[in-house]
Image (cartoon, coloured by chain):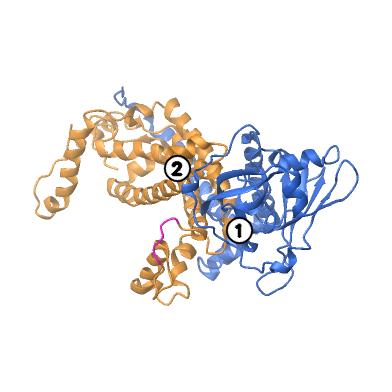
Chain colours: A blue, B orange
């Protein structure tokens, strides 16, 4: 229970000294917080706030404190790495992704505004595997993949980094089965997946590629999806083969996969190069 | 219980003054750390929210908006003189109160930074509450219900009573806080827990499925997270107004930790 407040007699000089100390700390803290906050804000965000004079004043304060944009990028990227490490620590290969029933399925949403290859590309499509233990480069057709591997289905939610999500009924082969049939070279920890979707809305080259850690690829719910809603994938959703890793953000679920390259070191990732996280584990 | 009695000890011993200890140093530190942290969380959170608003309606043909927050911006630009003529009315809230539209990657990085700071700061606060035993004054009690009603009656009548120069005594308060204060100050750490829980439910719905289910589903967590933000923002206005109304001693006590209001049990903010 709450105790009654007990007054204490303190010398006025002591109270004054403590007040001075605490208010000086408070003032210094306020200034440091303002300088830190200003330093962390993106450059164009700063342009929308304060007056030009105040902006200059804050900029020079940050410059004097050594709070440069380079250091900001360094620390913010460290934050991303820290958060990725937490996500990796939370990840368990035995934990199943929540599944839904087919009646929960939402309309498919396509968030890509670039150009998708036309149907003429499908007959010539192959999946190229490299970085294999055999040292060979394998080329697989969609017929090979459909006939060699067991078909698995799952109804899972796809989470977009933007915040929207959708439940879809997917079908395809397990990435783990492909890894078993074509084992990567010893020491491989990563895969880089490339896509046939590689042109922006004005037709300029905009290749898409993602990195996936092999523990995720080996998860039983990591599919190389060939079907959605019981039908072959439409072109807008990555025909003929897309990655489906429901334990990762949607941006890792690369469409129209054309090649998988295994490596010991972490490969480049399209969205990581644009300021997003690398690991993206949900 | 007269406030004049506060001056008595000073008259006896002019070199000393009677004070009561109000807030532990860690409580004070975390209180002020919360200001830039919550500000940063809300500003970056709005820019994340912009990318895919959870509260949407059918697209309005006139404004092109399907987002209630964009509607609020459009309303502000139309009706608030200082905002008139803004080139992006639908983005007003995101640009002025957030870090801007089309800033998702930057907003996410900053949001994680402020979120980890918020959680660390929360631990600092809890530690301070226990070290200073401040938690005792925060715990709700049964008498809070009738006392809260008395406080509401007091606040409703205080301005008319002042205008008509009628006596309007403050209800007696035996605790560090009155019932309304306790309700507000107790609900803040609870809101903080809800903000962190709904945040993790959205951030790791696959590895923390039980947490996602606590909010029914992913969108449930998004809705709770947004509402918690609105409640935090709503708390700030009366909090600051009442501290100003209550005076310098109350404000100072959150910086230095002690108060000179020894014999006056009517702390209001």
Q: Residue furthest right?
A: A135
- Residue at which label 1 appears: A61
Is there any visible trace of residue A111 in the rendered image? Answer: yes
Mark 1 vs mark 2, foreground winner is 2
Magenta stretch holds residue B55: yes
Q: Is residue B64 left or right of residue A231?
A: left
Magenta stretch holds residue A183: no
Q: Is residue B48 left or right of residue A149?
A: left
Q: Are marks 1 and 2 in contact (CB under 8 Å)?
A: no
Distance (Cα) linking label 1 and label 2: 33 Å
Could you tell me residue A267's position as x and y percent? 78, 50
Could you tell me residue B76's position as x and y percent? 37, 69
Residue located at (23% from left, 29% from top)? B174
Residue range highlighted in magenta: B54-58
Magenta stretch: helix, strand or loop mostly: loop
Please tell me the numbered disc located at residue A114.
none
Q: Nearer the viewer, residue B17 or B193?
A: B193
- Residue at which label 2 appears: B195
Could you tell me residue B61's position as x and y percent? 40, 74
Quadrant of the snapshot with the N terminus of chain A: top left
Residue located at (66% from left, 58% from top)? A238
């Amino acid at each position: 229970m709450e105790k009654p407040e007990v007054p204490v007699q303190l010398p006025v000089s002591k109270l004054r000294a403590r007040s001075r100390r605490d208010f000086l700390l408070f003032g210094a803290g306020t200034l440091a917080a303002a300088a830190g906050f200003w330093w962390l804000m993106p450059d164009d965000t700063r342009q929308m706030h304060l007056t030009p004079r105040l902006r200059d004043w804050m900029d020079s304060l940050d410059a004097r404190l050594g709070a440069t944009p380079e250091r900001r990028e360094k620390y913010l990227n460290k934050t991303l790495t820290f958060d990725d490490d937490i996500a990796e620590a939370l990840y368990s290969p035995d934990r199943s992704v929540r599944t839904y029933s087919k009646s929960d399925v939402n309309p498919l949403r396509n968030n890509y505004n670039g150009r998708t290859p036309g149907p003429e590309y499908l007959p010539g499509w192959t999946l190229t595997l490299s970085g294999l233990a055999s040292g060979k480069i394998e080329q697989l057709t969609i017929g090979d993949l459909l006939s060699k591997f067991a078909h698995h289905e799952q109804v899972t939610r796809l989470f977009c980094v933007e915040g929207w999500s959708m439940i879809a009924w997917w079908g395809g082969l397990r990435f783990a089965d492909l890894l078993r049939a074509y084992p990567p070279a010893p020491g491989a920890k990563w895969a880089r997946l490339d896509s046939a979707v590689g042109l922006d809305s004005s037709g300029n080259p905009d290749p898409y590629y993602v990195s996936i850690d092999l523990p995720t690829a080996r998860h039983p719910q990591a599919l190389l999806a060939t079907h959605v809603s019981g039908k072959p994938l439409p072109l807008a959703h990555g025909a003929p083969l897309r990655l489906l890793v429901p334990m990762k953000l949607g941006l890792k679920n690369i469409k129209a996969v054309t090649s998988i390259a295994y490596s010991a070191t972490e490969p480049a990732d399209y969205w990581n190069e644009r300021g997003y996280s690398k690991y993206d584990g949900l | 219980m007269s406030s004049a009695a506060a001056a008595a000890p000073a008259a006896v011993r002019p070199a000393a003054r009677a004070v009561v200890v109000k807030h532990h140093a860690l409580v004070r530190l975390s209180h002020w750390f919360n200001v830039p942290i919550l500000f940063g969380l809300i500003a970056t959170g709005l820019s994340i929210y912009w990318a895919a608003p959870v509260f949407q309606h059918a697209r309005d043909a006139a404004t092109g908006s399907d987002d209630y927050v964009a509607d609020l911006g459009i309303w502000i630009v139309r009706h608030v003189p200082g905002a008139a003529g803004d080139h992006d009315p639908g983005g007003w809230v995101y640009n002025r109160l957030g870090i801007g539209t089309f800033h998702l990657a930057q907003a996410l990085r900053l949001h994680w930074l402020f979120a980890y700071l918020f959680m660390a700061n929360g631990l600092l606060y809890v530690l301070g509450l226990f070290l200073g035993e401040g938690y005792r004054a925060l715990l709700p009690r049964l008498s809070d219900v009738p006392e809260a009603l008395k406080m509401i009656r007091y606040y409703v009548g205080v301005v008319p009573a002042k205008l008509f120069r009628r006596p309007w005594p403050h209800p007696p308060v035996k605790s560090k806080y009155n019932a309304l204060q306790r309700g507000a100050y107790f609900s803040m750490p609870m809101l903080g827990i809800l903000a962190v829980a709904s945040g993790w439910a959205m951030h790791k719905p696959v590895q923390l499925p039980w947490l996602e289910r606590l909010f029914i589903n992913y969108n449930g967590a998004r809705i709770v997270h947004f509402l918690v933000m609105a409640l935090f923002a709503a708390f700030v206005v009366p909090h600051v107004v009442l501290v100003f109304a209550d005076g310098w001693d109350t404000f100072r006590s959150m910086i230095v930790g002690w108060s000179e209001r020894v014999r006056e049990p009517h702390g209001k903010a």
